[in-house]
Amino acid sequence: MARSKEQNERMRETRKEKIRNAALLQFVKQGLFATRIQDIAAEAGIAQGLLYHYYASKDEIFVDLINDALDKTIEASYSVRDMETGPGEKIRFALEKLVETIEHSQTFLDTCRLITQATNSTAIPLEAQNLILEKRNIPYQVIEKIMEAGQKEGTVVAGDPKMLSIFFWTSINGLAIYYSTNDNRGVKLDYWVIASMFLIETEREREE
């Protein structure tokens, strides 16, 4: 029985996701330059010729990974921004979910490593460099506005909202990179520890 158009599209997306996941592992492990297209195909468990039906080059996969990661971070930031709750609760919710993701998603950890490597390198495709310049600051700007609103509300500590936003994201990114590069997971992550840097009276609220 012939597959429907929808079934073909689902299969195509499933294979592309498999290729992206395989490429992410290889790029994080070897770097863009050392990774070969055959390495990605082998990791994905597909023929190299089939891979070329989806991507013309490893650079194209790299750009797709960077763009997808940035877009998902922006989308998540906007979702928090648009929550029907106060800014302090938005910060608390975002930290809780991000820490939970760090604990349970290896893909998230590897993606944080990839973005960090790409941000600090000029040896990546120009399109990827431009995407990073265009999009990387948007989540920072979103959290900055939430921090500023929280200060007016009285739930966020005093300080430059932009600096607080930088602390927010670098704390999450640092934890993600640590967990991605270390096998020792003996320390249980507690989002309240991070939240206490930003939210007023979080410990008292926690005890209640």
Image (cartoon, rainbow, N blue to C red):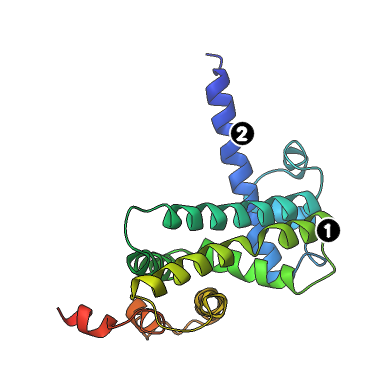
- Find residue 125 and name its label: 1
Quadrant for the C terminus, please: bottom left
**Quadrant location of residue 23?**
bottom right
- Along the line of sight, the residue nearer the viewer: 103 or 116: 116
Q: Residue at x 67, y 58 (%)?
A: 135
In this rendering, would 30 be left or right of 151? right
Secondary element at image label 1: loop
x and y percentages locating residue 203 in the rendered image = 25, 84
Residue type highlighted by circle 2 = Arg
Q: Position of residue 129 (x, y in %)?
A: 79, 61
Residue 44 position (above or below residue 171): above
Tell me which numbered mark, 2 or 1, is placed earlier along the sequence: 2
Q: Is 7 placed above or below 91 here?
A: above
Please name the residue shown 50% across and 58% down the image: 77
Would residue 122 be found to the left or right of residue 176 on screen? right
Q: Which type of secondary structure does the marked residue at label 2 adopt?
A: helix
Q: As rendered, which of 101 and 133 lies closer to the eye?
A: 133
Q: Residue at x 76, y 42 (%)?
A: 55
Question: Disc 2 vs disc 1: Cβ atoms closer than 8 Å?
Answer: no
Question: Could you tell me how many numbered marks the image carries?
Answer: 2
In this view, the residue farthest toward the left is: 208
Residue 150 at x, y percent in the picture: 39, 71
Direction from residue 162 to residue 56 in the image, left or right: right
Q: Kindly indicate the quadrant of the structure image that contains residue 157.
A: bottom left
**Which residue corresponds to mark 2?**
12
Q: Nearer the viewer, residue 140 or 70?
A: 140
Q: Amino acid at mark 1?
A: Pro
Choose between 106 and 1: the one closer to the eye. 106
Give the alpha-carbon distance from disc 2 to disc 1, as whole Å.
25 Å
Badge nearest the viewer, 2 or 1? 1
